[in-house]
Image: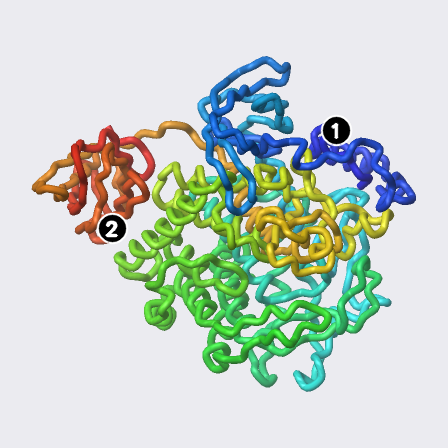
């Protein structure tokens, strides 16, 4: 795709889309339109920097029913007037900023603008503060529909072992199949092991190239696959599966009667299954850790031109448990569409679990980093928990339940997840899959742990100028992935409770990723006026070779890394504030690489954000709140919730906000958590079912000072009670 100037003419996303359509229609290569010296040519327009836009917004836009906040970089100590202007420039809303002051992560002085009260829709809005205007943005219910598709197209275009079709990806991105044993390739249909690992060859074709390199890694493929399949499983539970269904993506399998998101995930699942050590071989049932070139692939290199020998690396317990977890999930989710494939997945999952139990400490080490990432992992207890959780959710068998309940991860607080820490994936499955074979109190506790983690992320966001769910010391390699993963936990908490604050947190995270940040930068290619376009990649490498394209729309950059772990970052970012340690340069692999697990988080969030919701739902219920006893600084109360409707309530979550400084210290007959004034109380399992006309009560003890007024409003499963 020819370079499209950012910040001028058409919005970046629209310009990219029109360019791709024009080239596809003409049957021409984007290279034919690229200037001969595109990588070094002098820009034809002024260079736009973050300092030119002190009003930082989500450069894609906002949802009419979602949060609408912006950050202003200003040292002013008093509130500033702001105006929201429509496409014609006319003012449609106005107010004054809230002074935040110093933002530690960015090193900037900040103000906040909240224009959430405006619910109009349209294109080309701008926010003007103290004479400075933001980039233009939209307010639309369909805001994230394009990103929902493009973040998934990334995976099709990362496929190994298949030609990428110009009709699906655009002519600039079409290429022959890579690593199918066709010269000069030396893989992946018959790949030898490293010396001393095995004495046979394996067919490990297919799957996705992992990141900017052309390696394929089971542990990163595992988490990425789980996120895509979980996204569909979640949508199916909520009744939104159709928008992720068949013929919704640009994939060659469209029209086959299987949801396209599952078709894409299957491309990786088939590779993961091929990585399992065959029966009759030493360590049968284990999974090889990875396959890649013997030496690091040169940059740039198109896959079909790679002439290096490919090698299988030793099996590992972590890789084997990734296979067990994702294959068990596969068996559960694919069963309605392909029973034979689901059965094959379950068989592989069982064999992997048995092999991992027999070889529990075969660990990948940091030393295995020639030609590809090591993906080392010294603690696989979290992978054991995750795999057991998926197998339990799929089979209900006691052996997996015992492994879940005996794991220390089953009762620990929820921790952030990543490819090397996967326990929370298991927790999400156990908390959300209906009918999981666990005691009700276990499920309730897991749900409470997830929402407590989400409350922690909200608390972190509340103390910042840019509302990011990681602390100032959290800007590490792949920080954007951590941001997106934490947003997923908030979205899960929203699904579990219906509490709007969790949806707000997840959506404000998208604001950060799409431009409301210290660098005024959208980290998603093709989305925003100042979007990343030079991510580290072997064949989307226009910065190095003008005949090659930029990364396609929907590719997700790794983000700021305060440790500056590559030569380009060290040279260009010395002294940067943590949230500003990023450069859009193909050489900065520590801040600007792409990766399948990162894009999987983006795809999950984009699907969540794109869901249509109705406002102000109501429930058929009534609530009685009574203070039983009060003394000095404390009191006890009983809350009774009644189902006044005609349908049974299966599982309930009651929410309210205290009007004073009341703080719950303990509760009985329910699990209660509190964030600020907001309280969430969940059923205890045994009292979770309310037949029509039935009621249940729970109690709590709390502290207070001054007045002790009763809450004015209650919600049941996110909907207002009468």
Whether residue 263 is visible here, answered yes or no, is no
Secondary structure at numbered mark 1: loop
Q: In which quarter of the image is residue 647?
A: top left
* Residue at numbered disc 1: 8
Report the disc number at residue 22.
none
Q: Mark 2 points at which residue?
A: 671
Residue drawn at (49%, 77%) of the image:
356
Q: Is residue 115 above or below residue 316?
A: above
Q: Which residue is drawn at 39% across and 38% down?
A: 501
Left-right relation of 251 to 363: right
Scheme of image coloration: rainbow
| Residue 386 coordinates in the image, percent (x, y) | 45, 65
Q: In front: mark 2 or mark 1?
A: 1
| Residue 43 appears left or right of 349 | right
Looking at the image, which is closer to me, 302 or 510?
510
Q: Is 651 positioned to the left or the right of 628 in the image?
A: right
Measured along the vertical axis of the image, is residue 219 above or below residue 226? below
Q: In which quarter of the image is the N terminus?
A: top right
Is 58 left or right of 250, judged from the image as shown? left
* Residue at 70 percent of width and 55 percent of height: 569
Q: Distance between the residues labelled 2 and 1?
A: 53 Å
Q: How crowded is mark 2: few (under 14 residues within 10 Å), some or many (20 or more)?
A: many
Q: In this view, does 402 lie above or below 559?
A: below
Q: Identify the image quadrant of residue 553.
A: top right
Q: Residues within 10 Å of mark 1 (few under 14, many from 20)?
A: some
Q: Which residue is drawn at 32% across and 33% down?
A: 719
Q: Position of residue 32 (x, y in %)?
A: 90, 41
Q: 632 and 630: which one is in front?
A: 632
Rendered-image quadrant of the C terminus = top left
């Amino acid at each position: 795709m020819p370079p499209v100037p950012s910040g001028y003419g058409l919005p970046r996303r629209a310009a990219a889309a029109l360019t791709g359509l024009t080239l596809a229609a003409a049957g021409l290569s984007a290279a034919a339109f690229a200037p001969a010296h595109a990588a070094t040519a002098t820009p034809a327009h002024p260079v736009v920097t973050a300092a030119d836009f002190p009003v930082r917004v989500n450069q894609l836009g906002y949802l009419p029913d979602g949060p609408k906040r912006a950050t202003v970089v200003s040292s002013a100590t008093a509130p500033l007037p702001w105006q929201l202007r429509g496409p014609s420039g006319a003012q449609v809303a106005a107010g004054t900023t809230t002074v935040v002051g110093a933002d530690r992560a960015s090193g900037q002085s900040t103000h906040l603008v909240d224009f959430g009260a405006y619910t109009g829709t349209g294109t080309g809005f701008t926010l003007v503060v103290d004479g400075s205007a933001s980039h233009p943005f939209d307010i639309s219910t369909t805001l994230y529909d394009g990103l929902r598709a493009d973040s998934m197209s990334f995976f099709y275009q990362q496929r190994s072992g298949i030609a990428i079709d110009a009709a699906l990806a655009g002519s600039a991105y079409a290429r022959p199949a890579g690593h199918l044993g066709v010269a000069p390739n030396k893989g992946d249909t018959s790949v030898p092991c490293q010396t001393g690992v095995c004495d046979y060859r394996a067919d490990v074709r297919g799957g996705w190239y992992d990141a900017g390199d052309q390696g394929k890694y089971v542990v990163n493929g595992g988490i990425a696959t789980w996120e895509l399949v979980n996204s569909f499983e979640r949508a199916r539970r909520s009744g939104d599966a159709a928008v992720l269904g068949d013929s919704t993506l640009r994939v060659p399998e469209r029209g086959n009667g299987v949801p396209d998101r599952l078709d894409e995930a299957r491309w990786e699942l088939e590779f993961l299954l091929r990585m399992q050590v065959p029966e009759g071989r030493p360590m049968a049932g284990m999974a090889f850790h990875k396959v890649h070139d013997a030496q690091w692939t040169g940059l740039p290199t198109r896959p079909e031109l790679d002439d290096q020998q490919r090698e299988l690396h030793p099996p590992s317990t972590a890789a084997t448990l990734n296979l067990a977890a994702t294959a068990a999930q596969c068996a559960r989710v694919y069963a309605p569409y392909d029973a034979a494939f689901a059965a094959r997945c379950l068989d592989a999952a069982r064999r992997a679990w048995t092999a991992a139990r027999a070889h529990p400490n075969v660990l990948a080490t940091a030393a295995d980093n020639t030609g590809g990432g090591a993906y080392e992992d010294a603690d696989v207890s979290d992978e054991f928990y995750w795999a057991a959780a998926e197998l339990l959710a799929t089979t209900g068998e006691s052996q997996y339940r015992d492994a879940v309940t005996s794991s220390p991860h089953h009762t620990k607080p929820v921790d952030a997840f990543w490819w090397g820490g996967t326990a929370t994936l298991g927790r999400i499955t156990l908390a959300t899959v209906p009918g999981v074979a666990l005691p009700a109190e276990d499920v309730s506790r897991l749900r409470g742990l997830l929402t407590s983690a989400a409350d922690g992320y909200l608390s972190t966001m509340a103390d910042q100028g840019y509302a990011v769910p990681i602390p100032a010391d959290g800007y590490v390699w792949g920080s954007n992935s951590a941001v997106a993963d934490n947003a997923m936990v908030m979205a899960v908490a929203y699904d579990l409770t219906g509490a709007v604050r969790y949806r707000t947190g997840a959506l404000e995270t998208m604001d950060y990723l799409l431009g409301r940040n210290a660098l005024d930068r959208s980290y998603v290619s093709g989305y925003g006026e100042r979007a990343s376009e030079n991510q580290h990649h072997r064949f989307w490498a226009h910065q190095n070779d003008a005949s090659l394209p930029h990364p396609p729309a929907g590719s997700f950059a790794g983000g700021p890394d305060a440790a500056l772990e590559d030569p380009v970052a060290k040279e260009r970012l010395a002294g940067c504030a943590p949230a500003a340690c990023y450069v859009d340069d193909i050489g900065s692999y520590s801040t600007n690489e792409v990766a399948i697990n990162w894009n999987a988080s983006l795809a999950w969030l984009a699907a969540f954000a794109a869901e249509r919701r109705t406002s102000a739902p109501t429930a058929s219920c009534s609530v009685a709140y009574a203070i039983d006893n009060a003394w000095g600084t404390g009191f006890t109360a009983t809350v009774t919730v009644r189902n006044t409707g005609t349908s049974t309530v299966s599982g309930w979550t009651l929410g309210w906000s205290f009007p004073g400084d009341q703080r719950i210290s303990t509760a009985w007959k329910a699990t209660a958590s509190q964030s600020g004034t907001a309280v969430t109380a969940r059923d205890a399992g045994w009292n979770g079912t309310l037949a029509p006309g039935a009621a249940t009560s729970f109690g709590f003890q709390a502290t207070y000072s001054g007045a002790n007024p009763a809450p004015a409003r209650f919600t049941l499963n996110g909907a207002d009670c009468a």
